[in-house]
Amino acid sequence: MFGLEALELARIQFAFTISFHIIFPAITIGLASYLAVLEGLWLKTQRPLYRDLYHFWMKIFAVNFGMGVVSGIVMAYQFGTNWSAFSEFAGSVTGPLLTYEVLTAFFLEAGFLGVMLFGWNRVGPGLHFFATVMVALGTLISTFWILASNSWMHTPQGHEIIDGIVVPVDWLAVIFNPSFPYRLTHMAIAAFLATAFMVGASAAWHLLRGRDNPAIRKMLSMAMWMALIVAPIQALVGDFHGLNTLEHQPAKIAAMEGHWDNSSGEPTPLLLFGWPDMEREETLYKVEIPYLGSLILQHSLTEQVPALNEFPPEDRPNATIVFWTFRIMVALGLLMIATGLWSLWLRRGDRLFHSRAFLRLVLWMGPSGLIAILAGWFTTEIGRQPWVVYGLMRTADAVSNHGAEQLGLTLALFVLIYFAVFGVGFVYVLRLIGKGPVMDEGKETGIGGPGQKRTPARPISAADEAIAHEHGDQLGEGN
């Protein structure tokens, strides 16, 4: 297919499916915690707008949760269909880690999701809040196990290789491998930021169209506080993650920096832009800042960053892709920090909700968190190449024995089906966001909460209550 070999098609297929899948868990991780905060604030303050925001975002959470489960199942099957050699080699590590995710996170989410989604009028406020918190905790536990498995593939430890098969000998070392803490923190914060900018963009969209109410303002305000506080923390975590990657995967760092040669003995500059050419082994059209590469990565003005020509050609990742995906991620992160700082400045004089230039920026930044996550994953996974388990198994040795025609056909089917099915899901979510939260300020505190009477779920029941109320009024007048 298009002159591509089976290995390349298998990699493209997995990249395509994981790119779709990672969007949904990122949103559900952030939204679940956001919902827990909203319900907690509602219980504490009894302000109806928190309750209304909870019901609004719970619908969007439910749709994303469903799409995440469906797309995740497809990925799990691909380990057996397209990467059977990898499963045979490392399944004794990755299999149990994914099983732990099911036994802890998935069961926890499944046990409380029904209460969270359908128990608002059926259980007490404490139990309903507990269910929401448990679902949020489940999403984070799921992140823990998935990142433990993936991080082990980047920095494997705690194992022995017996008869060509990985055998775990120290599960704590397997789980808490060197890159795991940094990657877990980086991914969790990325999910919170992606959700914050999605919530903020929703509020900006309504404000730009003249729909201004306390719930919309609260959405924007909470989102911008998150950006202001968390985006700089993410930059700091990213710096620690980069230092860890430099220690354990120096070829990836060299590709991210587009740095080819250390023969001059000079400190490494930071390349802002350029085009790493894998054939010519140099970065073309580069714009650089002297010394800054060494300062950022080595925290020194004299030490050099590893160069790509220090590694055999067959051990180098594709620097052209990694160089640019890394810069997309960093650029969006800097824009997030700038947006948070601008929001802080606009809070003076109550201009946060009225500056149309700022609201347009927030609207355009809506998908920035998800794009940054995708760019970061491309940087991480392509930068690991040519290894599927770093230093232990090459990607070329991990693929199943399928022909290019078979993989090309299944890839085409995946593209068609995913865009059809998940495209409908995306459109539905956008329509829900476009409607905005329904304000119900007429309900006073203590009314309409978990376990308390609200509008019935069945329309006929609501009609019966209205008729009964009307007859009661007439009888009262007759007396």
Image (tube, rainbow, N blue to C red):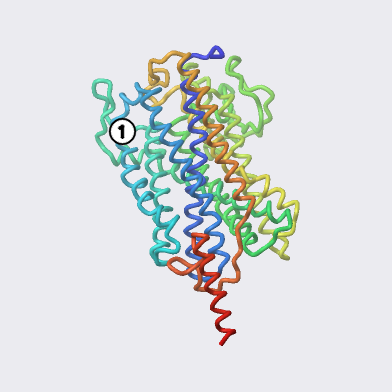
- Residue 109, image x and y in percent? 38, 50
Amino acid identity at mark 1: Val
- Residue 166, image x and y in percent? 28, 27
- Residue 219, image x and y in percent? 60, 58
**Rendered position, 63 above or below 411:** below
The answer to whether residue 201 is left or right of residue 108 is right
Label 1 Cα neighbours within 10 Å, binned few <14 / some 14-19 / many ≥20: many
Residue pictured at 73% horizontal, 57% vertical:
210
The residue tagged with tag 1: helix, strand or loop? Answer: helix
Q: Give whichever of 176, 412 is nearer the camera.
A: 412
In this figure, what is the number of numbered marks? 1
> Which residue appears farthest toward the bottom when viewing the image?
479
Residue pictured at 47% horizontal, 23% vertical:
11
Q: Give whichever of 142, 110 is nearer the camera.
A: 110
* Residue ID for mark 1: 93
Quarter of the view holding residue 151: top left
- Residue 382, image x and y in percent? 50, 27
Quarter of the view holding residue 269: top right
Residue pictured at 62% horizontal, 59% vertical:
221
**Rendered position, 477 above or below 130:** below
Q: Give whichever of 244, 22 is nearer the camera.
A: 22
Residue pictured at 51% horizontal, 66% vertical:
41
**Rendered position, 135 above or below 77:** below
| Quadrant occupied by the C terminus | bottom right
